[in-house]
Amino acid sequence: MERVTDVHDLLRIAGAADLDGAPPEWVEASLVRAPWVVVRRGPSHPSRMAVGVRGSTREQRFAAHVRAECVLECVTPEQLAAHRAWRSSPRLRNVPALAALEAVATMLERTGLRWGPAGSIGFELASGVETAREGSDLDLVVHAASAIPRSLARALVADLARQPVAVDVRIETPAGAIALLELASSARDVLVRTHEGARLVTDPWATA
């Protein structure tokens, strides 16, 4: 696979044998059920990508690396949003976070931001395997190469708060990820999550 991957991208692989190291036993069973891993934040190399494996419980999370040549398919959150992947989901009536995506999509499209579903919702839409639960939050990722005004962040937080589910938005800036809630706050600094760890900065776009 030649494309450069971003954090939150979903990668289809053949199975646990494609991962570096010796994963715990549950990883093999999980990848038989859904052979997908998620690109995570961490040191990577052009030939080895940092990924995470989801298990059947919150406690089952495994950090690993996968070689680029083992990636059979890549699906980005933005692709899921562009294709309206949730519309064909058989679980729209059972999972409120899935049902909320239609209204959220309309709202975010008006901003012109690049966005897509992540977390359990994004994983389910990419893999086709039931992963989200009735009480799942709706996790979103926004890629913003240029600064998002704090006034827009506050308006988005207010609009998203009206949704019937909790919506958690991570903004991927050139410096790292920040929470939409922090950008919308009155705090001078925001916490940026980088490949080297978290740090407080005043402007993650200027910092980069």
Image (cartoon, helix red, strand yellow):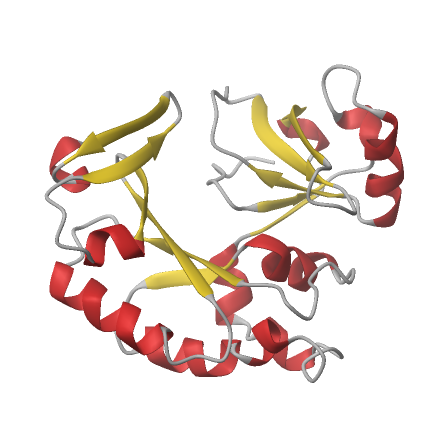
Write down the quadrant of residue 29 in the picture. Answer: top right
Q: Position of residue 202 (x, y in %)?
A: 12, 38
42 lies above or below 128: above
Q: Is residue 5 above or below residue 121?
A: above
The residue depicted at 55 percent of the width and 63 percent of the height is 137
In x, y percent, where is residue 106? 39, 82
**On the rendered image, what quadrant is the C terminus found in?**
top left
- Describe residue 28's horizontal placement relative to residue 60 as left or right: right
- Answer with the quarter of the image where residue 96 lies: bottom right
**Which residue lies at the image location 60% right of the left edge and 74% below the top edge?**
98
Task: Using the image, determine if residue 120 lies above or below residue 177.
Answer: below
Q: Nearer the viewer, residue 185 or 73?
A: 185
Q: Residue furthest top?
A: 21
In this image, 93 relative to 25: left or right?
A: left
Looking at the image, residue 73 sits to the left or right of residue 77; the answer is right
Name the image quarter holding the N terminus: top right
Which residue: 57% across, 72% down?
97
Image spot of residue 116 (x, y percent): 46, 62
Q: Residue at x 18, y 67 (%)?
A: 152
Rendering quarter of residue 94: bottom right
- Residue 205 location in percent, x, y? 17, 41
